[in-house]
Amino acid sequence: QVQLVESGGGLVQPGGSLRLSCAASGSIFRINRMAWYRQALGKERELVAAITSGGIINYADSVKGRFTISSDNAKNTVYLQMNSLKREDTAVYYCNANIIRVDQYEGRYWGQGTQVTVSS
C-alpha cells in the first residue's frame, strides 16, 4: 500500500556528483521523516542523512559538507545531492520513510536500493 521508489544511482568518478531521488506513493496520510541509508559490501547499513517533516536535518559525519538532503513535501519526495564523491561512498543507497497511512497504521518503509559506484 506504500511504495518507495529510488532513482539516480550510477557510476561516477572520484570528485564527481550524483543526485538521488526517492518518491513515496500509496495510501499516505503523513510522512514524518525521510532518510537515506547506505550499505557497502561487507559492512552494516548506516544512516547517511535524514530530514523530518519539520525540517530538522542530520548527517553522518562522513558526508557533512559534501551531501545535502532535501524534500518536496507536496510530491512526497526526498533528494540526496552528493558532491565531491569519494571511493568510500560506494554502496547501495536505500531510501527510508516513517509513514502514517490513511488507515492510521504507522510504519517504517524501505526502497529497493540504488547502487552508487565511485571509481575511476
Image: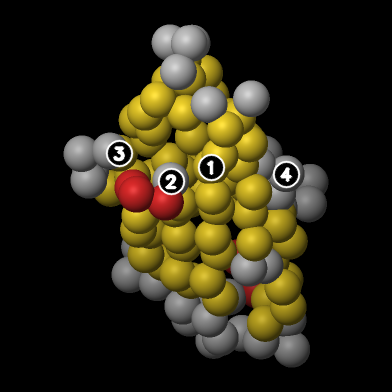
* Amino acid type assigned to the residue bearing label 1 in the image: Ala
For residue 23, above or below residue 54? below
Mark earlier in primary sequence (3, 4): 3
Q: How far apart are marks 3 and 4 (CA)?
A: 21 Å
Residue under the image location 55 percent in, 53 percent down? 22
Which residue is disc 2 drawn over?
76
Q: Work out whether residue 62 or residue 73 is closer to the camera in this orientation and state it.
A: 73
Dot 3 or dot 1: first in sequence order is 1
**Which of the colour schemes (rainbow, by chain, secondary structure, one colour) is used?**
secondary structure
Q: Which residue occupies 67% across, 82% down?
A: 12
Q: How many other residues sit within 10 Å of disc 4, few (<14), some (14-19) or many (≥20)?
A: some
> Circle 1 is placed at which residue position?
24
Asked which secondary structure carries label 3, the reply is: strand
Percent of width and height locating residue 60: 41, 51
| Residue 69 higher or lower than 55, as above or below | below
Q: How far is disc 1 from disc 2 in space, using C-alphas?
A: 5 Å
- Counting from the top left corner in percent of width and height, residue 73 is at 33, 47
| Label 1 vs 2, first from the N-terminus | 1
Question: How far apart in space, not on screen, are marks 4 and 2 (Cα)?
Answer: 17 Å
Residue indicated by mark 3 = 52
Q: Name the residue under label 4.
A: 112
Q: How crowded is mark 1: few (under 14 residues within 10 Å), some or many (20 or more)?
A: many
Q: In the image, residue 84 lies at what x, y percent?
A: 48, 81
Examine the rendering and report whether any part of residue 46 can be seen: no
**Mark 1 vs 2: CB contact within 8 A:** yes
- Vertical arrangement, residue 88 with respect to residue 45, above or below: below
Quarter in which the N terminus is drawn: top right
